[in-house]
């Protein structure tokens, strides 16, 4: 089983809302990632978690708050977003953070900020 | 800086024709390279990867890629394209530790019947 699941598939929110994106994997992976993908652009890394600890924050604005409550689950809490934050948010996981650890991606959550 | 470049933004081929998608890399040492495919509105699926060893790598769905150090290239090939191969294709490499992937701009493949 190489499946990474993400919920919801679609999310529409206003700029004053608070919402959360959820990502789950049951492959025993200990590294999890959030990527942001704008339309017609490649994915860009936002955060990396390794063994439930934040390893990389790619200078992401504080209105995006990641959380890794356990090794199978990764959340992205959203607050006071801007319309330019509308994008496809992809989650990925890998066995670890070694260079040879392949990342497996979920289907993404398409976020629209009004 | 380490980078991956895909020179072709958009490619159109006829169904049954052969395909080659170009990827060039800029790395000091031997790079770890990947090809991912993304169907519209979907996540990314790994087609194949190169870490070391044999420079011709076989992947899923009939794809293969060849690592050529002399040309700094890692081109993706398929001998006969199917209509279902229409998608966005991303070449990617690792940069800066922590298994950080950096992606090329992508090549959008259209397949004519």
Image (cartoon, rainbow, N blue to C red):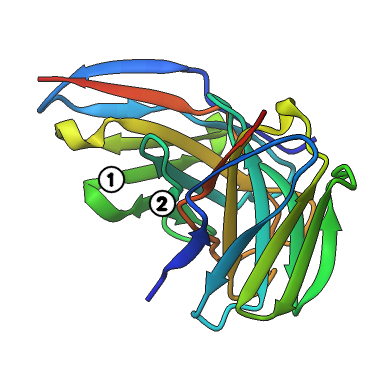
Q: Residue at x 31, y 54 (%)?
A: B58
Question: Which image quarter holds the N terminus of chain A?
Answer: bottom left
| Residue B110 in picture, x, y percent from top left | 28, 21
Name above or below for residue A67 compared with residue B44. Answer: below
| Residue A5 in picture, x, y percent from top left | 47, 64
Secondary structure under badge 1? Answer: loop
Are marks 1 and 2 in one subunit?
A: yes
Q: Quadrant of residue A30?
A: bottom right
Q: Which mark is residue A26?
A: none
Secondary structure under badge 2? Answer: strand
Disc 1/disc 2 C-alpha distance (Å):
13 Å
Q: Residue at x 27, y 16 (%)?
A: B12
Label 1 CA crowd tier, 10 Å (few <14, some 14–19, many 20+): some
Q: Chain of mark 1?
A: B
Q: Is residue B111 left or right of residue B4?
A: left
Q: Chain of mark 2?
A: B
| Residue A59 in picture, x, y percent from top left | 89, 44
| Residue B25 in picture, x, y percent from top left | 61, 34
Residue located beneath label 2 in the image: B45
Name above or below for residue B5 compared with residue A63. Answer: above
Is any atom of residue A88 visible in this view?
yes
Q: Is residue A85 left or right of residue A16?
A: left
Name above or below for residue A104 compared with residue A43. Answer: below
Q: Residue at x 46, y 17 (%)?
A: B8
Q: Quadrant of residue A95?
A: bottom right
Question: Does the CB distance between marks 1 and 2 fall below 8 Å?
Answer: no
Residue located beneath label 1 in the image: B63
Question: Which image quarter holds the C terminus of chain A?
Answer: top right
Nearest the viewer among B50 and A54 is A54
Name above or below for residue A45 compared with residue A38. Answer: below
Label 2 CA crowd tier, 10 Å (few <14, some 14–19, many 20+): some
């Amino acid at each position: 089983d190489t499946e990474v699941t993400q919920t919801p598939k679609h999310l529409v929110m206003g700029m004053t809302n608070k919402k959360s994106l959820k990502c789950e994997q049951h492959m025993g992976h200990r590294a999890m990632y959030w990527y942001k993908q704008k339309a017609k652009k490649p994915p860009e890394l936002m955060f990396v978690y390794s063994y439930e600890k934040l390893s990389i924050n790619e200078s992401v604005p504080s209105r995006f708050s990641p959380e890794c409550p356990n090794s199978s689950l990764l959340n992205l809490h959203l607050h006071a977003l801007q319309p330019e934050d509308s994008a496809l948010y992809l989650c990925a996981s890998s066995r670890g953070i070694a260079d040879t650890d392949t990342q497996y991606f979920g289907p993404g959550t398409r976020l629209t900020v009004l | 800086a380490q980078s991956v470049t895909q020179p072709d933004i958009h490619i159109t081929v006829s169904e049954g024709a052969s395909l080659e998608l170009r990827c060039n890399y800029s790395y000091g040492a031997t790079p770890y390279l990947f090809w991912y495919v993304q169907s519209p509105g979907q996540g990314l699926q790994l087609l194949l990867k190169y870490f070391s060893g044999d420079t011709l790598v076989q992947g899923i769905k009939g794809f293969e890629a060849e690592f050529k150090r002399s040309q700094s290239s890692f081109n993706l090939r398929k001998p006969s394209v199917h209509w279902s191969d229409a998608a966005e294709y991303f070449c990617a490499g690792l940069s800066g530790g922590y298994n950080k992937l950096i992606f090329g701009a992508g090549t959008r493949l259209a397949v004519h019947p």
